[in-house]
Image: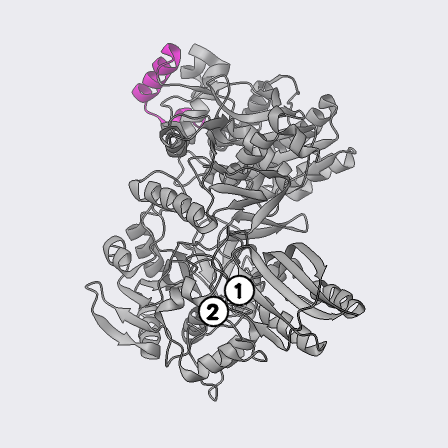
Amino acid sequence: MIQRLHITICGTVQGIGFRPFVYKLAQTMNLPGWIENTPAGVLIEIEGRHQHLEKFILRLQQEKPDKAFIQSIEFSYLDPVGISGFQIQESQSTGKPTALILPDIATCPACLEEVFDPNNRRYLYPFTNCTNCGPRFSIIESLPYDRPNTAMKHFTQCSPCQQEYENPKDRRFHAQPNACSACGPHVELWNLAGDVLADHHHAIQQAVHHLKTGSIVAIKGIGGFQLMVDAQNEDAVQALRQRKHREEKPFALMLPTLETIQQLCSIEPLEERLLCSAEAPIVLLQQIKSPSTLKISASVAPDNPYLGVMLPYSPLHHILSKEANIPLVATSGNRSDEPICISEKEALSRLNQIADFLLVHNRPILRHVDDSIARIILDREQILRRSRGYAPLPVMLSSNIPGVLAVGGQLKNTIAITQGSNVFISQHIGDLETAEATHAFEQVIADFQNMYQIYPQKIISDLHPGYTSTKFAVDSKIPFTKIQHHYAHIASCMAENGLNGSALGICWDGTGLGTDGTIWGGEFLSITEDSFQRFASLRPFPLPGGAKSIKEPKRTAIGMLHQIFQEDLLRQTHLLPHQQFTASDLELLLQILKKKLNSPYTSSMGRLFDAVASIIGLCHEVHFEGQAAMKLEFITDPALTSQTYSLSFSSEIDWQSMILEIIQDQQQEFTLSKIATKFHNTLANLIVEAARQSGEQKIVLSGGCFQNRYLTEQAVEKLRSAGFQPYWHQRIPPNDGGISLGQIYAHLREPHHQNHLDE
C-alpha cells in the first residue's frame, strides 16, 4: 500500500547541503516527493510503501550531513496524491523563522584543493565555497537561507556556476554563496585615500609584498577587518601596538600550516582537532621555549607562555598565507574599545591612523563576527570568546520560554534572545565603553529581533544601573527585570551543563554589583530550586581611587594592606607596593582610606589576585584586563601542588593570615613561582572546603577567574578526589560573554516559571 509521508524538520538544516542530501537519498531509494526550505526549517513530502518510508526516516537521521543538527523531526502519514519524481521546490518566505542559522564555516578540503589546482577554474579564487563550507551568518539577511536573502544577491551566477547550483549531483547544488572569478566578488588593494592600487590576485601579491616589507595591512575577511603584520618583524609589531594603543595584550597569529604551528608550539591531539575544525578558532597553545627554526617577535605575546594561533579559515586567508609563507599577526580591525570594521567606508575612517594599506573585497559583510578564542582544558574544549564558527547556534533549555531578551553585562558583552526552548546567543560584541560599541550593541539586538522575528515581551539586565546594557533595558519601554551578576554567571554554567535543582555556585571575577549595593566578586552562592543565597564571600577590602585601582594593582594592595596595618602602614617600608609611591602620595592614599573617600569596598577575587601580584612585586600596573592574574598563573609550578597558605572557610573568608604569610615568604626571598603556586593551591583547597560545608554534591565554577587554567584544573581535580561533582564551562565563556545566557536561565528558574521546568 502506497502512503504519503509529510515531514517537518527543525534545526540546523539550511546552508549545509541538507536539501541536496535528501534529494540524493530519495533518488537512491526511488521515492518520489519534494523538499523545500521554510523559515522554520525544511518540509518534505515523499511517497512509497510504509516499510520504505520508515527506512527513509531512519537513513535521514543516520546519514545526514556532518554539520546538520536535527532539533526536532515530526512526521505524519497521509493519503498519496500520485507524486512523480523528486524536486527541490522554491522556498517558502512566509511563517515565523525558527530554522537555525549556521555559523560561518572554514574552507573544506575539497574547495581548498580546487583553490590550489592550476587546472581548476577556481584556481586562486579567494571566494570559493560549497555546501560544506563558506560564509553563512555573516552574509544572511533573513530566513529562509536562500541566495536572494543573502549578501550574494548582488552577484548573478555565470552559466557554469548556475549549472553547478542546479545539479543535484554537484556539491555546490544550492550552495547559496556559490561564485567564481567570472561572476563573483573580487579583491582590491587600496591606499588610505581609497585609490585602487591592484585587483584580483595581483592585489593579494602586493599586500604580501607590503607585509614582508614591514607595513600594516587591514584585510577584509569573513566577519570584518583584521590588521595584519609580519610577526617576525619586531618594528612592525611594535608599530601596530603603538598605533592601536595596545601596549601588552597578546596578539593572535595566523600561520599557513599545522607544521608551521608545530615549530612554535606544542600541540596535543585535541588541540590539533580544534585547530583543524570547521569552527577554526584561535587556539591557545603552549609555546616551545626555544624554537630551533621559526622565530617570532617577542612583542607578539610579551611574557606569555601561550600563543593564540589559528590556521587560515577562508580561501582568501589560505592564498594570502601561502603567498606570504610567514607567521602573520592577525588581530581585530578596530580601534581600542570599538567593534571591528565591516565596510570599506568604516575602515578608511577608523583604521586610517593604524593601517598602511587595505585589502578589500566587494562582498558585503552584513554583521561583524570576530574570531573565536578557545583552548583545551581538562581534555575538553573551552571557549573564551564565542563568535565566528559558533554564533548564533543556540543553547537548548528544557522548556519553552516566551520571547525574552537578555542584554548581558558591560564587558565582553553578548545578548541573547529566546524562541521556544532555544536561546540564541549573539556573537561577541565587546566592552560597551564607547559610542561605537553601544551602536553595535543596539544593532545586534535589532538584527536578532528582525532575523528571528522575535519581539520580546520582557528584557533582562544586570543589577548595575550604570551599565550601558542596563540603561538600554530601562529605556526600552518594555517590562524588564534585573538579575544579579554572579548568579547569572552560575546560571549560565548550569544552563550549559543542563543542571536543574540545587548546587553550590562558586563565582570569582573582577567586579559585579551585589544585592547589597556593594561590589562582589569572590562569591560562594547557595543555588536553590528557584533563586540563590550568598553562602560565603571574601572579607571586603577597599579600593582607593575606585576604578583607578583596576588599572593599578599597587593601589588595591595598599587598600588590602591598610586593612591589616592601619596607621602603621606608613612605617612598613619593606612592603613592595609601599615602595611604588612617593611619601606624599602614600600619605594621601592613607588619608583617602581613613576618610573612606572614593574607596569602595569589594569582595572581588580578581582584585585579590591583583593585590597578591603587587605584594610580591610581580605586577604593579596593568595594561589590559586580567594581566596581573595571568602573570601569577604563568609562574605556577605543577610540581608544588601540596604547598599552601593558611586560609579558613567561613561565611566571611578572612584573607589576612594568608597575606601575612605571603609577605613573609617574599621577605625570605622565596621564589615568585613558589609563592604564586602556594596561593593558587590555597584557593583550590578553599573551594573543596566550601563544598564540604555546603552539603551540596554539585559544584558549579564560573566567572573570569576560571579562565585561569591552573586554578580550574586544581579545583576540579581536588573536588573529584573529595567525591564532589564539579561543573565548568565548555561551549559558553566563563567570563562575561556568558552573562546573557545566565540572565535568561536565572529568570526561567524564578518561581512563576517552575511549572515549565518540570514539564
Q: Position of residue 320 (x, y in %)?
A: 41, 72
Residue drawn 50% across the image and 68% down it: 90
Is residue 270 in sight in this rendering?
Answer: yes
Magenta stretch: helix, strand or loop mostly: helix
**Nearer the observer, 402 or 722:** 402
Residue 165 inside the magenta-drawn segment: no
For badge 1, the amino acid type reads Gly
The reply to whether the C-beta atoms of the residues labelled 2 and 1 are less than 8 Å apart is yes
In the image, residue 72 above or below residue 293:
above
Report, in whole angstroms, how far the alpha carbon at label 2 lies from the one at label 1: 7 Å
Is residue 122 in sight in this rendering?
Answer: no
Q: Position of residue 341 (x, y in %)?
A: 33, 55
- Pick the quarter of the image with the N terminus: bottom right
| Secondary element at tag 1 | loop
For badge 2, the amino acid type reads Gln
Q: Which residues are magenta?
A: 574-597
Graded by Cα atoms within 10 Å as few (under 14), some (14 to 19) or many (20 or more), the crowding at tag 2 reads many
Residue drawn 22% across the image and 63% down it: 192
Q: Position of residue 419 (x, y in %)?
A: 54, 44
Sequence-wise first label, 2 or 1: 1
Q: Position of residue 184 (x, y in %)?
A: 38, 75
Q: Which residue matches tag 2?
A: 176
Graded by Cα atoms within 10 Å as few (under 14), some (14 to 19) or many (20 or more), the crowding at tag 1 reads many
Residue drawn 27% across the image and 65% down it: 357
**Nearer the observer, 418 or 684:** 418
In the image, residue 660 above or below residue 57:
above
**Nearer the observer, 261 or 173:** 173
